[in-house]
Image (spheres, rainbow, N blue to C red):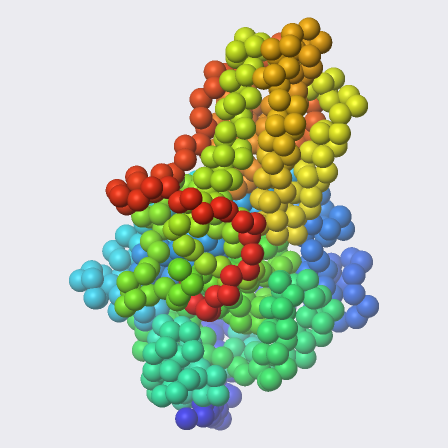
């Protein structure tokens, strides 16, 4: 059934006086907009167009790592989606948040002020239904699931700065103000709507995008026919502007192939979308119509701004925006790309606000090459995974083995192989045997500065080259490649150890023994650099390495990327006694019967995967 919108003369008259205080609202709104655009036009723009809205988009959509992308004092604001609380956290949510945390930690290492925002989306029909199924009210249900997310984030060492819940009073205040601004701009109208609705997506669907029997292509469930009297956002009004600005700012949507998807959606024709629901009670009331609630996406997307509000201040849109907007990076799953790369920019344009600098849509996860689902009995529960293996292995595997932006697969045997080979063997064992030799032959004390030990030695140059690669990969959000570059430092250290055989040199005594002592300093300096460079991904392991090298915790906590420069270890520095920083995962421990996998671990390759919802 084709969706249709029928406006009426009554609706048109309603637009002339939509709010009781519309005159004052509009006066304030347009004074604000005039001042905003006046400031905008007085600033240099990176675009050739004279359109103030287009300049607004262009000036904010530059790559967040470019030197001209903003003032040095601008915060780096990174967001995960606000996760829907219809059910407990799943691995897809955990994956997004682990990636966001690694990016945030790297940006902090660069010395930037970081605001890492995550939270929960708690309104809508699906939430009320899920609560009723559990025999609880929506509020109690939201409290429980929101707390479950916070607990999981703690277990995964997620160092977020803001956790916003869409049921927070400050969020509701800002949503209503934003709605009123868009209304005053003439972009909200009332109409009848009839179409096919997916409850799980909380979205009306075009018939052409549905599968057989009107099934949603994401949730594989039939969409229901609905007819409602709702309020609509004039998305179609922004079609040309979105087309032009995306063409001029290809870095706005990443990876690049996601941009092609977004441009295809826009070119196929944008339709106005409903931003209220008459039949949903669990939501924020429409400011001018208490019989309707605001559509969950028009509500939840504002969480990225309301999160910036401080708890001790009276919330309003202007102060929230001044506290850090625009976001540097929205990190999302590809299934919600349309909302973030089409709906959200148009909404912000309407309200006269800057656009985020980048929207990055990553792929889905599969398990053993198959789509995950309860019916298949192959779900991957993040709580169970982190309790069984710990946070660092989980964080490392998914960031190292999944090419960021593409789909990825989890298989337990590969998980164990990768973690053992990379973290336990390449890194952990190298540190342990080096400290063992140092204790046996040098009383755990460094005989020379690492900078002096490296004079005329190519090993230092190799490490510096890999550190530069790692930084570049982090900046480009190539997290897997960043991990690989850091691991290569460990491989180089192991190769150097095997080539030099310091255990043999110590036995020879004299100058050979002195050379062996310097070799240990070189390898331990490389380990120190690994600890810093890998800390965005494995913060606990990195701290244990730093501790073994004799550093206090406060020095590790204050470390920046500058600490990856060669020369941190000094003569006379006493190392801790050797103690394994990462224990191998034994298969016998995992399932009680099998031995550790013996298959060799090859370098990461793309695995053919079926697209699955994470």
Residue 176 visible in this rendered orientation of the protein: no
- When the figure is inspected, residue 360 is found, relative to residue 20, above or below; the finding is above
Q: Residue at x 42, y 74 (%)?
A: 218
Q: Residue 389, image x and y in percent? A: 37, 41
- When the figure is inspected, residue 117 is found, relative to residue 358, above or below; the finding is above
- Give the residue furthest to the top: 510
Q: Residue 70, image x and y in percent? A: 71, 50
- In the rendered structure, the answer to whether residue 565 lies left or right of residue 393 reads right
Q: Residue 35 falls in which quadrant of the image?
A: bottom right
- When the figure is inspected, residue 480 is found, relative to residue 295, above or below; the finding is above
Q: Residue 82 falls in which quadrant of the image?
A: bottom left
Q: Which residue is drawn at 52% across and 11% down?
A: 440
Count of marks overlaid on the render: 0
Residue 601 visible in this rendered orientation of the protein: yes
Q: Nearer the viewer, residue 250 or 178?
A: 250
Q: Residue at x 34, y 82 (%)?
A: 222
- When the figure is inspected, residue 265 is found, relative to residue 138, above or below; the finding is below
Say which quadrant the C terminus sits in.
bottom left
Q: Which of 229 and 247 is in front in this view?
A: 247
Q: Which of 27 and 233 is in front in this view?
A: 233
Say which quadrant the N terminus sits in.
bottom left
- In the rendered structure, the answer to whether residue 11 lies left or right of residue 280 reads right
Q: Residue 361, image x and y in percent? A: 55, 63
Q: Which residue is drawn at 77% across and 21% down?
A: 455
- In the rendered structure, the answer to whether residue 502 lies left or right of residue 366 reads right
Q: Residue 151, image x and y in percent? A: 34, 44
């Amino acid at each position: 059934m084709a969706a249709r919108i029928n406006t009426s003369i009554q609706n048109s008259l309603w637009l002339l006086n939509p709010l009781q205080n519309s005159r004052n609202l509009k006066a304030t709104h347009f004074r604000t907009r005039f001042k905003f655009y006046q400031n905008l036009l007085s600033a240099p723009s990176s675009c050739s167009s004279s359109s103030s809205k287009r300049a607004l988009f262009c000036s904010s959509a530059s790559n967040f790592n470019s030197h001209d992308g903003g003032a040095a004092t601008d915060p780096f604001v990174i967001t995960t989606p606000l996760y829907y609380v219809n059910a407990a956290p799943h691995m897809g949510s955990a994956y997004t948040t682990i990636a966001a945390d690694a990016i945030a930690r790297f940006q902090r290492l660069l010395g930037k002020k970081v605001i890492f925002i995550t939270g929960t989306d708690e309104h809508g029909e699906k939430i009320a239904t899920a609560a009723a199924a559990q025999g609880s009210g929506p509020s109690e249900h939201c409290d429980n699931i929101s707390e479950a997310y916070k607990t999981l984030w703690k277990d995964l060492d997620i160092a977020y700065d803001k956790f916003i819940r869409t049921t927070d009073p400050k969020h509701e205040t800002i949503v209503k103000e934003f709605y009123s601004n868009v209304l005053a701009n003439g972009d909200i109208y009332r109409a009848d709507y009839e179409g096919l609705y997916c409850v799980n997506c909380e979205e009306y669907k075009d018939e052409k995008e549905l599968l057989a029997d009107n099934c949603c292509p994401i949730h594989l469930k039939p969409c229901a026919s609905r007819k409602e009297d709702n309020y609509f956002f004039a998305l179609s009004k922004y079609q040309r502007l979105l087309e032009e600005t995306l063409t001029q700012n290809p870095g706005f949507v990443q990876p690049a192939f996601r941009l092609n998807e977004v441009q295809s959606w826009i070119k196929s024709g944008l339709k106005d979308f409903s931003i209220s629901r008459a039949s949903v009670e669990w939501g924020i009331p429409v400011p001018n119509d208490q019989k309707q609630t605001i559509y969950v996406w028009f509500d939840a997307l504002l969480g990225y701004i309301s999160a910036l509000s401080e708890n001790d201040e009276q919330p309003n849109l202007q102060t929230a925006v001044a506290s850090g907007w625009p976001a540097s990076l929205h990190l999302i799953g590809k299934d919600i790309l349309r909302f973030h790369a089409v709906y959200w920019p148009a909404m912000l344009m309407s309200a006269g606000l800057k656009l985020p600098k980048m929207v990055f849509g990553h792929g889905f996860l599969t398990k053993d090459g198959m789509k995950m689902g309860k019916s298949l009995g192959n779900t991957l529960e993040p709580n169970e995974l982190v309790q069984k293996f710990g946070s660092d292995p989980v964080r490392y595997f998914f960031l190292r083995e999944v090419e960021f932006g593409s789909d990825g697969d989890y298989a337990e045997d590969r998980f164990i192989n990768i973690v053992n080979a990379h973290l336990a063997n390449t890194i952990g064992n190298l540190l342990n045997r080096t400290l063992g030799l140092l204790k046996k032959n040098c009383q755990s004390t460094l005989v020379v500065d690492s900078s002096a030990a490296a004079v005329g030695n190519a090993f230092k140059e190799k490490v510096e080259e890999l550190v530069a690669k790692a930084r570049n990969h982090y900046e480009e959000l190539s997290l897997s490649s960043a991990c690989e570059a850091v691991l290569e430092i460990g491989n180089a250290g192991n190769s150097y150890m095997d080539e030099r055989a310091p255990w043999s040199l110590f036995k020879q005594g004299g100058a050979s023994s002195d050379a062996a002592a310097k070799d240990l300093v070189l390898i331990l300096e490389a380990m120190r650099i690994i600890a810093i460079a890998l800390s965005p991904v494995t913060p606990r392991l990195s701290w244990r390495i730093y501790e073994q090298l004799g550093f206090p915790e406060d020095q590790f906590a204050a470390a920046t990327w500058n600490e990856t420069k060669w020369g941190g270890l000094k003569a006379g520095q006493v190392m801790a006694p050797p103690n394994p920083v990462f224990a191998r995962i034994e298969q016998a421990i995992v399932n009680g019967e099998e031995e550790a996998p013996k298959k060799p671990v090859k370098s990461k390759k793309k695995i053919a995967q079926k697209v699955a919802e994470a």
